[in-house]
């Protein structure tokens, strides 16, 4: 069990999953950092994006990597609309209300999927999934490696967006000082919606990268919700580097828990970390602020 | 005070009306409907104590419900306890879990969304544990042997289960009524409205919240016990999964958080909505939960005080 | 024996020394005021006295008992209660229910607490608002409610934090009368206040805090003539202008 070969393999695997978690957490962190809301519909959105990729592949023969050009933009629009026309008006700006609204959205999305597409497991087969890359003592499926690289690229694009564009500056302004931003003419509602849209698009990217080596059911989002939250809280709500590091860390934690506690019990590794972080270090490891 | 009197009167009428239902209803289906309605009212009332009156929204109330169900099952199956003794142990265990989670969360100042998420995390931890442990049936869940008889808290006649759940719901309602008319209740509500102001007026907020979560947990565990005796089966998804947690919060939120009648109205609305969706959209899984989600959004938008808000206008 | 004695209280928040060897005494039967420019550390001192913040150094004694570092609710039970500068009503509850929360400190029974709340509200002129939700009150109403909640706990010492802020002149003079009647009823008052006219007309004794330190204390006449005080408020050299 402590064989270095197995540990390496498991760690590498954990890192590749962690890269996907990091991507999702990036989106959630943006949403939290700017709007100060915890998006409970995060997992459901991932699930919907996975279905979108699945049907694109099944009906139109579009492979997930091409889908990167279709699904994220579509989900950006979806996210924008959700925030601007559903969450904002229903939330009255109150923390716990917004959580309830996003809970409601997630209930609707989860069960819409269940109703339309049943609980049968779907997955797709793409040629890349059969390719394995040697990495020293172990080998990784190509899609997983692509996932890591893509996550890094998206992370960089994200950073460029936040620091080099006017939109990014506006977002950071609103995140820091809402009223001040309004006074200098920034449409806060629009920025909120843009941030939510970008965050949702990140999740959609994660879905495209995930689908070659994963499966799709209406319940698939559930597992990601708490993991995403843990990543965000661990990394420090509002810190992007924190989200990235947190995601990778959790991917490895999950992999190791699975190794030591077994497949079934291993799931609690992440939840325990979540509880511990919330109790003892709510500002996370890189934290900026707590409620 | 007149509000109190009125609520008590309405409750008495309601209880009377409910008590005579078995005289009019004989079909197994409808009896089952009323039993489940009261069951959800009980679970909803348990959430209401902590979330409605106390303002501490829990997203993982299943952690208390599931403990009630599993502990009573384990006590009977593995330790040969009598059903009623097992029930007492289970309710105590539920309360204990409540104290544990409450002590940790409140000691470290978790509020609002953080508290909601931590309860969810605890529910998930428990779910994974019972699902992986042979002692609790792992993936197969736990079964209770079918042995109808009062001593075993199992009844061949569904009407008797109805009266059992009615009594339990009355007890839960009694707790809510007590909150409305006691100092403890006033303290709890003050904490909900403004915790710092409550502290400044001499309220030991930690102790009050701890008491509230223990009571809430014990009531939820009572629901778990009932569920186990009625269905004779529980598994990790039923016991600790999101479904029961969501029901627990939907019922009082839709009916009217922080009111005695809210959970009843909520349970009735959701029950009716469930039947309506079944008839219009068929029995496909997911249909009625989708409707619940839509109803939640509607209530959040138009009725922030739940359906009770429609009646409150007068008082 | 002084009702309240604050000795040598110091508190640092990161790089900011909020209080430095601050001291004051509240004598029986007197209204005491704590004044000073913005940011002097007055609210911090209140927070320390009422148990919301633990001091780094020093001691707070109330009615002969050392209450340093005690929890706010225990201090409240002993008879020391504070109001907040930014009013903290129980927004969703009625005025009567708000005040009743305070009354419950001494009164276990719900209807008795509600009755006490009504009586108290009537005494300070809030009878018409008893059934109104707290969030519907004007700023003056909320300030009065804040005061009523605190009074309902039947305190011995009342810490009022800028209770006049935001009030128009007629409301100020009403509030002044209310505070005086509180003192006449046997409850000592320590108030933080910026409104000089109120401070001068109400206080028997004034303490001046600047940059966390007590720079002066005395009767209103003594304070207005004190050059250090004038400088603290109006700037360097103003004392000699």
Image (spheres, coloured by chain):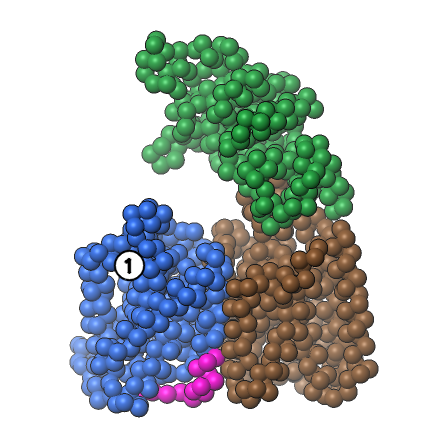
Label 1 belongs to which residue? A240
In this image, B22 relative to A62: left or right? right
Display colour for chain C: green
- Residue C96: x %, y % from top left: 68, 43
Could you say whether the residue bearing mark 1 is in a helix, strand or loop? helix
- Residue A283: x %, y % from top left: 38, 52
Q: Quadrant of the C terminus of chain C?
A: top left
Residue B176 vs B19, above or below: the answer is: above
User: Is A39 within the magenta?
Assistant: no
Region of the chain picked out in magenta, as a range: A111-124
In this image, A267 relative to C221: left or right? left
In this image, A191 relative to A147: left or right? right
- Residue occupying image coordinates x 76% and y 65%: B11
Q: State whether residue B139 appears in this view.
A: yes
**Considering depth in this image, is B191 or C88 the residue closer to the camera?**
C88
User: Is A118 within the magenta?
Assistant: yes
- Residue A107: x %, y % from top left: 48, 74
Q: State whether residue A25 appears in this view.
A: no
**Considering depth in this image, is B280 or C60 the residue closer to the camera?**
B280
- Residue occupying image coordinates x 62% and y 47%: C133
Display colour for chain B: brown
- Residue occupying image coordinates x 32% and y 46%: A183
Display colour for chain A: blue
Which chain is disc 1 placed on?
A: A
Q: Quadrant of the N terminus of chain C?
A: top right
């Amino acid at each position: 069990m402590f064989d270095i070969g197995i540990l390496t393999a498991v760690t590498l695997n954990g890192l590749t999953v962690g890269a996907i978690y990091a991507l999702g957490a990036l989106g959630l962190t943006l949403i939290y950092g700017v709007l100060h809301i915890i998006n409970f519909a995060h997992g459901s959105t991932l699930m919907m994006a996975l279905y979108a990729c699945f049907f694109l592949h099944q009906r139109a023969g579009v492979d997930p990597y091409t889908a990167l050009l279709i699904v994220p933009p579509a989900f950006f629009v979806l996210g924008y609309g959700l925030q601007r026309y559903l969450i904002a008006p229903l939330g009255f700006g109150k923390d716990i209300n917004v959580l309830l609204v996003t809970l409601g959205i997630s209930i609707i999305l989860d069960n819409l999927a269940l109703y339309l597409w049943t609980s049968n497991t779907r997955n797709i087969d793409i040629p890349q999934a059969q390719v394995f890359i040697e990495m020293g003592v172990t080998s990784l499926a190509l899609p997983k490696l692509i996932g890591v690289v893509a996550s890094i690229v998206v992370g960089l694009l994200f950073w460029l967006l936040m620091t080099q564009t006017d939109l990014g500056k506006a977002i950071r302004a609103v995140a820091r000082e809402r009223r001040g931003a309004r006074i200098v003419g920034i449409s806060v509602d629009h920025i909120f919606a843009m941030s939510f849209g970008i965050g949702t698009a990140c999740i959609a990217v994660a879905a495209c990268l995930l689908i070659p080596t994963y499966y799709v059911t209406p319940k698939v989002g559930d597992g990601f919700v708490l993991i995403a939250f843990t990543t965000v809280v661990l990394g420090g709500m509002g810190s992007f580097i924190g989200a990235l590091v947190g995601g990778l860390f959790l991917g490895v934690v999950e992999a190791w828990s699975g190794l030591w506690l077994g497949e079934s019990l291993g799931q609690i590794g992440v939840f325990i970390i979540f509880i511990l972080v919330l109790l003892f270090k709510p500002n996370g490891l890189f934290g900026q602020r707590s409620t | 005070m007149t509000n109190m009197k009125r609520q008590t009167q309405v409750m008495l009428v309601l209880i009377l009306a409910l008590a005579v239902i078995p005289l009019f209803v004989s079909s197994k289906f409808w009896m089952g409907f009323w039993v489940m309605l009261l069951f959800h009212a009980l679970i909803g009332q348990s959430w209401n104590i902590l979330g409605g009156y106390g303002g501490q929204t829990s997203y993982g109330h299943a952690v208390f419900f599931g403990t009630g169900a599993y502990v009573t099952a384990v006590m009977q199956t593995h330790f040969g306890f009598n059903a009623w003794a097992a029930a007492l142990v289970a309710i105590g265990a539920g309360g204990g879990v409540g104290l544990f989670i409450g002590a940790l969360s409140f000691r470290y100042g978790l509020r609002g969304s953080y508290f909601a998420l931590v309860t969810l995390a605890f529910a998930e931890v428990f779910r994974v544990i019972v699902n992986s442990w042979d002692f609790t049936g792992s993936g197969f869940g736990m079964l209770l042997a079918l042995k109808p008889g009062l001593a075993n808290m199992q009844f061949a006649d569904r009407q008797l289960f109805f009266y059992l759940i009615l009594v339990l719901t009355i007890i839960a309602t009694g707790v809510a009524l007590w909150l409305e008319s006691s100092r403890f209740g006033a303290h709890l509500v003050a904490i909900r409205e403004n915790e710092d102001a409550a502290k400044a007026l001499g309220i030991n907020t930690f102790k009050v919240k701890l008491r509230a979560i223990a009571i809430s947990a014990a009531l939820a565990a009572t629901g778990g016990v009932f569920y186990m005796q009625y269905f004779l089966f529980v598994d990790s998804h039923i016991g600790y999964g999101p479904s029961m947690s969501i029901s627990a919060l939907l019922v009082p939120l839709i009916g009217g958080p922080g009111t005695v009648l809210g959970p009843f109205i909520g349970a009735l609305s959701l029950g009716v909505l469930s039947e309506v969706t079944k008839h219009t959209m068929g029995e496909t899984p997911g249909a009625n939960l989708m409707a619940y989600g839509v109803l939640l959004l509607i209530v959040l938008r138009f009725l922030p005080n739940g359906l009770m808000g429609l009646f409150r206008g007068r008082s | 024996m002084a009702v309240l004695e604050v000795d040598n209280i110091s508190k640092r928040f990161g790089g900011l020394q909020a209080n430095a060897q601050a001291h004051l005494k509240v004598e029986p039967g007197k209204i005491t005021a704590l004044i000073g420019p913005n940011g002097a550390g007055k609210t911090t001192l209140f927070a320390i006295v009422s148990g919301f913040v633990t001091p780094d150094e020093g001691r707070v004694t109330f009615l002969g008992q050392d209450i340093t570092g005690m929890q706010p609710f225990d201090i409240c039970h002993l008879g020391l209660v504070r109001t907040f500068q930014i009013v903290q009503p129980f927004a969703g509850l009625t005025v009567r229910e708000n005040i009743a929360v305070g009354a419950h400190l001494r009164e276990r029974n719900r209807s008795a607490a509600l009755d006490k709340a009504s009586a108290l509200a009537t005494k300070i002129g809030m009878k018409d608002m008893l059934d109104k939700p707290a969030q519907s009150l004007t700023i003056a109403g909320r300030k009065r409610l804040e005061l009523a909640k605190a009074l309902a706990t039947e305190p011995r010492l009342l810490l009022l934090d800028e209770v006049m802020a935001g009030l128009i002149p007629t409301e100020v003079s009403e509030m002044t009368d209310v505070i005086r009647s509180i003192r006449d009823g046997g409850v000592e008052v320590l108030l933080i206040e910026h409104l000089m006219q109120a401070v001068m007309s109400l206080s028997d004794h004034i303490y001046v805090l600047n940059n966390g330190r007590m720079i002066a204390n005395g009767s209103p006449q003594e304070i207005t003539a004190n050059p250090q005080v004038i400088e603290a408020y109006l700037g360097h050299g103003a004392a000699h202008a």
